[in-house]
Image (tube, rainbow, N blue to C red):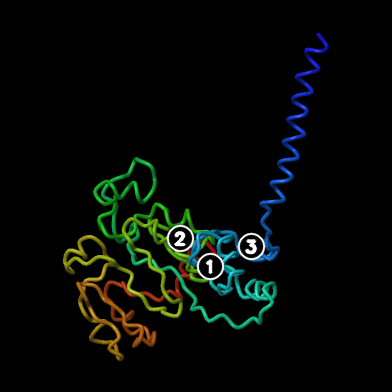
Amino acid sequence: MLKELFVPALIFAGIGILSGILLTVFSKLFHVETDERLEKITECLPGANCGGCGYAGCSDYATAIINGEKSDLCLSAGEKNVSEIDNIMGRTSSPSSSVKKVAFIRCQGDLSKSEELFEFKGKATCKSSNRFYSGSKRCPFGCLGMGDCKAVCPHDAIIICDGLARVNPDKCVGCGLCVNECPNNLIIIKDKKEVINVACNCDLTGKETRENCKSGCIGCRLCERNCPKNAITVQNNIAVIDYEKCVSCGICISNCPSKTIVDIRNSKKINATNGVE
């Protein structure tokens, strides 16, 4: 009986020892050196994996930096972390040449300006609501206000107030995660210095737009006629700004009867009014 137990145990022990030896040999043969800089650079990155740098995630971007990529592509890292990455890489830091980006939502239609036609009872997301008659709001082109963009923002830069998403430009880094979440394609990433913006995405006629939303662009051309730099024109019933000409004087804002044109520098004040700041 003892022999019957001892022999199998001895066999299993032998297999275990042999497996250990083989694993050790293979680990030596196929060992891949890990660049110690990779972990250090990854720690300097925010870990949001937002994709704003053009890579799938922070780890991929860290690998790209080691392989020669620029260290200032991460919109969330900040100058201090970029400088630290350059120190790790043993290269001289230079001021970031990247233009600061910010998300902008092309809509002003909160519930006071574009009323709800019905109460949506399904899953409370913009994408699910959009499948039913293009959403519950009267304007089929506007913000549905259910927060799909807010849910993916890694910087808490978006709030939902009175059925409308709003961006705080001081918190937004322009990573772009919110862009693909909007079923009405309202969100764009733009240069932060382009402060004057048209907050409407509706290309219907002025009469039709007014029926759907009190703050929609009606194509009246008052902004176009009064711009001292000829920087704004109406195209397909929507005002369009040429930022090569625009000097951010704000004359178009004061002349817009629908208050469709806005200055993103006021967005922080709006958020503060709604108890965010």
Disc 3 residue type (three-letter)? Thr
The residue that label 1 is drawn on is 171
Q: Is residue 277 left or right of residue 240?
A: right
Q: Is residue 107 left or right of residue 39?
A: left
- The percent coordinates of residue 275 (x first, y second) are 52, 61
| Gap in angstroms between the C-alphas marked 3 and 1 | 22 Å
Q: Locate the C terminus by quadrant.
A: bottom right
Q: Identify the amino acid type marked 2.
A: Leu
Disc 2 target residue: 177
Name the kind of residue labelled 1 in the image: Lys
Q: Residue at x 43, y 74 (%)?
A: 264
Q: Please, is residue 30 above or below residue 262 in the view?
A: above
Q: Which residue is mark 3?
A: 42
Q: Which label lies toward us, 3 or 1?
A: 3
- Is disc 1 surrounded by few (<14), some (14 to 19) or many (20+) residues within 10 Å? some
Residue 198 shown left or right of residue 21 in the figure: left
